[in-house]
Amino acid sequence: MSARTYLDHNATTPLRAEARQAMSEAMDLPGNPASVHAEGRAAKALMERARSQVADLVGCAPNQVIFTGSATEAAALAVAQKHRHGGFFAALPTEHDCLAVWSDAALASLYDRNGALSASGASAFTTFITQRADAAWQPDRGPVALVAMSAANSETGVMPAAAKVVADNSVNAARAGTVPYSVICDITQMAGKMPVVYDGDRRPSYMILSAHKMGGPKGVGALINFTSEDPQAIIRGGGQEMGRRSGTENITGIAGFGAAAEAAARDVAAGRWDEVAELRKILENALAAGAKTTIFVGKEATRLPNTICFATPGWKGEAQVIQMDLAGFAISAGSACSSGKVRASAVLRAMGFDDETSASAIRVSLGLETTKKDVLRFAEAWLKREEKFRARAA
C-alpha cells in the first residue's frame, strides 16, 4: 500500500513536535491554575506563558487573549457582546458557519468571482450601514452594528481587503464623527501562515483563532479582545480567565497552543510559507495545463499561500474527494453533505457561481511538510480521473 499524502491542512494541521513536547510536560503538572499553592502557581505560570506566546503571534497584549474551547466558542463569545456595538450583528454569506449562524441580517456578498470587492457588494453594505445609522444612531453612541469579516476564507483561501474599503465608504454615510461599525475578524486560517497586521485605525474589536489550524491540539481556541471592556461571559461559574470564561482551563491544550503559536511565528518570519506558495503555483499550473474546463477560484486574488479551490462543473466535489482518498490523497470538498443531501458551496454561490459549479468544488490545502513530489503526484492522479470524467460526460 502506497503512503498517503495529507493535503487538507485548512481542516486541521498535524501536531507540531513543539506542541507535543509542551503538552507532554504540561500533563505532568498536578496543580489547578486557580490554586495558590506551588503546584497551582506552576500551572498558572505555564498558562500565562502560553498566553504571551499567542499574544506575540497576533500582536496584542497578553491580557487581551481569552482561551476558549474552540474558535467556534470564541465566535459565540464575541457575538454575545453585540449589545455594546449597536445591538445588531451581521455576517457576510462568505463567513464561516460559526459566525454566519448568528447573523441578524441576510447581507449581500461583497465579493465577485475573482474574490475582489465588487461595486454592488460595497454599495449594498454601505446602504445597510446607512439604514442602521438612521435607525439607531445617537450623538456619541458609536458603532451601529457588529460585523464579521474574515481575514481569509477557509474554503477559497481568498484574503479580502474589503473591510477598510467598505469602512471608508460607510463613514460619511453613517454619520460624521462616529465609527460606523465594529468588526469581528476571523483569523483562524491566516494566523501562523502570514503576519497578522492591522490597517491603521481599522483594527478589529475582536479576533478569533484556533490552535489546531497552526499545528496545535484540537479543542482549544482564543478570542482576542481589543475593546476597552472585558467581554461578558457566556459560560459562567468559577470566574476563570479573569471572569471572562468560566471553567477550569485546559492546561495541556493551552500549553500546546502556545508552543505551536511560537513555532508558527518563527516559520512566518523565516519565510517558509513563501516556499509553500511556490508549490501551490506549481500545482495550479500542472492542473490547468491538463484540465481546460476547470475553474480556479480567486486565482487572481490575494490568497493564503497554501490554498487552492477549483471546480470542474458537473463533477461532484464529494465524488472527487472519494476518488482521491482511494488514490491516497486527503483533500476536502467545497460543498458539504447534510442529512444525505448534497448542497452547493454557500461561499461559491455568494461569489456568483452557479449551483452546478459550486457543488463541484474541491479544496487542496498544503502544509510546510508538503513537497514538490507530493503536488506533482496529486496533479497526475487527479488529471487521470478528470480525463475519465470528461470521457463519461462526452
Image (cartoon, rainbow, N blue to C red):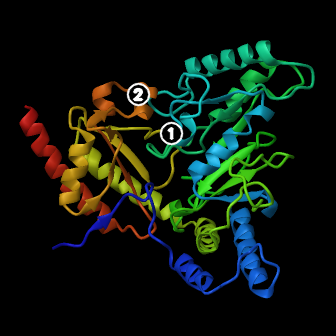
Instruction: Please say if 31 is above or below 326.
Output: below
What residue does disc 1 label? 97
Q: Residue 328: which quarter of the image?
A: bottom left
Quarter-wise, where is residue 104 in the image?
A: top right
Q: Are marks 2 and 1 in contact (CB under 8 Å)?
A: no
Q: Position of residue 133 (x, y in %)?
A: 78, 17
Residue 96 placement (x, y as % from top left) = 51, 41
- Apparent side of residue 113 relative to residue 61 in the rendered image (left or right): left
Q: Which residue is mark 2?
A: 349
Q: Secondary structure at mark 2?
A: helix
Residue at x 44% of width, y 34% of height: 347
Q: In this orientation, does residue 59 appear?
A: no
- What quarter of the picture does the N terminus occupy? bottom left
Question: Which residue is painted at 55% across and 83% down in the image?
Answer: 24
Residue 235 picture location, percent across and down:
68, 51
What residue occupies the far front of the structure in this picture?
237
Q: Which amino acid lies under the numbered mark 2 shown in the image of this protein?
A: Arg
Tell me the kind of residue under disc 1.
Asp
Spatial CA span between label 2 and label 1 = 15 Å
**Label 1: how many residues lie within 10 Å, few (<14), some (14-19) or many (20+)?**
some
Name the foreground residue: 60 vs 25: 25
Q: Position of residue 353 (x, y in %)?
A: 37, 27
The vertical placement of 242 against 388, above or below, is below
Q: Which quadrant does the C terminus fall into?
A: top left
Please tell me which residue is depicted at 43% across the width and 59% down the height of the picture: 9
- Taking the view exactly as shown, the residue that stands out farthest to the right is 139
Q: Is residue 353 visible?
A: yes
Residue closest to the eye, 122 or 81: 81
Q: In the image, what residue occupies the spot 74% across and 75% down?
A: 33
